[in-house]
Image (tube, rainbow, N blue to C red):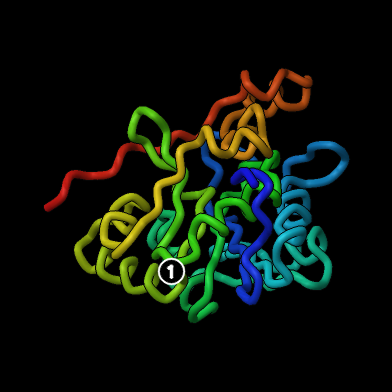
């Protein structure tokens, strides 16, 4: 059985946290509610998350909760940030504290092409580790399409914030045991890696809506991990 065919681990639950609290300054419109395929980004992402989890959280910063409820309906937990850090780690920490333990996939609201099956594969790679994080050949990582053990990630996030380090990669560097998953392993389920594409600007949105091939869309490709202290 290949990694792409691997089933979800039995007896273990995966939660999914969608981060939707950002200001969308480059888009100049809330990315969570952008349309694609007849529904909003946030509704599409939640639907994909629901394929692999019955516990989906959306962390919304200090935004209007009612607007999210209108797009998500029932079955999704909507949380305001407990931390106002102007960085994804604040939403992640809010989600990790809510979940307590178990595994949590974290995705951004600007990734409308995310596939639930990809999250399931990354989950299977996380079992027995502190996290599973996709890794590019360049050494860059994908912290917002990754799966974390919530209690360990919460502790690492608290330590990173206490040091004034607010990048996701700073938290990841503090985890005990990270399984870095080559992005090539995701291609069996997502050949063009659309799950790693993020839509940040009006030009990106126009390209997505015009049907530009997924391989031409911008990939998140976060910065490389920091060197050991």
Asked where in the image residue 206 lies, by quadrant, the reply is: top right
Q: Residue at x 18, y 44 (%)?
A: 227
From the top left corner, tell me how far across and down residue 166 is, in percent: 31, 56
The answer to which of 205 and 114 lies nearer the viewer is 114
From the top left corner, tell me how far across and down residue 192 is, in percent: 64, 27
* Residue 30 in sight: no
Horizontal side of residue 120 vs 94, given as left or right: right
Asked where in the image residue 72 lies, by quadrant, the reply is: bottom right
Q: Residue at x 73, y 41 (%)?
A: 34
Residue, disc 1: 93
Q: Residue at x 65, y 35 (%)?
A: 188
Horizontal side of residue 73 vs 151, given as left or right: right
From the top left corner, tell me how far across and down residue 57 is, in percent: 64, 68
The answer to which of 6 and 132 lies nearer the viewer is 6
* Residue 153 in sight: yes
The answer to which of 53 and 2 lies nearer the viewer is 2
Q: Residue at x 71, y 61 (%)?
A: 52
């Amino acid at each position: 059985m290949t990694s792409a065919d691997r089933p979800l681990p039995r007896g273990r639950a995966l939660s999914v946290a969608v981060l939707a609290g950002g200001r969308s300054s480059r888009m100049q419109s809330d990315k969570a509610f952008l349309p694609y395929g007849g529904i909003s980004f946030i509704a599409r992402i939640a639907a994909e998350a629901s394929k692999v989890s019955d516990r989906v959280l959306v962390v919304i910063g200090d935004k209007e909760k009612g607007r999210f409820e209108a797009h998500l309906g029932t079955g999704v937990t909507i949380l305001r940030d407990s931390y106002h850090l102007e960085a994804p780690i604040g939403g992640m920490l809010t989600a990790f504290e809510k979940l307590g333990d178990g595994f949590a996939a974290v995705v951004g609201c600007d990734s409308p092409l995310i596939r639930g099956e990809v999250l399931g594969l990354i989950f299977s790679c996380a079992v027995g580790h502190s996290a599973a994080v996709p890794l590019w050949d360049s050494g860059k990582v994908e912290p917002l399409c990754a799966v974390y053990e919530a209690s360990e990630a919460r502790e690492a996030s608290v330590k990173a914030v206490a040091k004034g380090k607010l990048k996701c990669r700073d938290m990841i560097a503090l985890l005990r045991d990270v399984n870095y998953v080559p992005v090539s392993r995701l291609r069996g389920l997502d050949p063009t890696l659309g799950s790693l594409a993020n839509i940040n600007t009006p030009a990106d949105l126009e390209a997505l809506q015009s049907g530009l091939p997924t391989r031409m869309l911008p990939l998140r490709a976060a910065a490389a991990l920091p060197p050991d202290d």
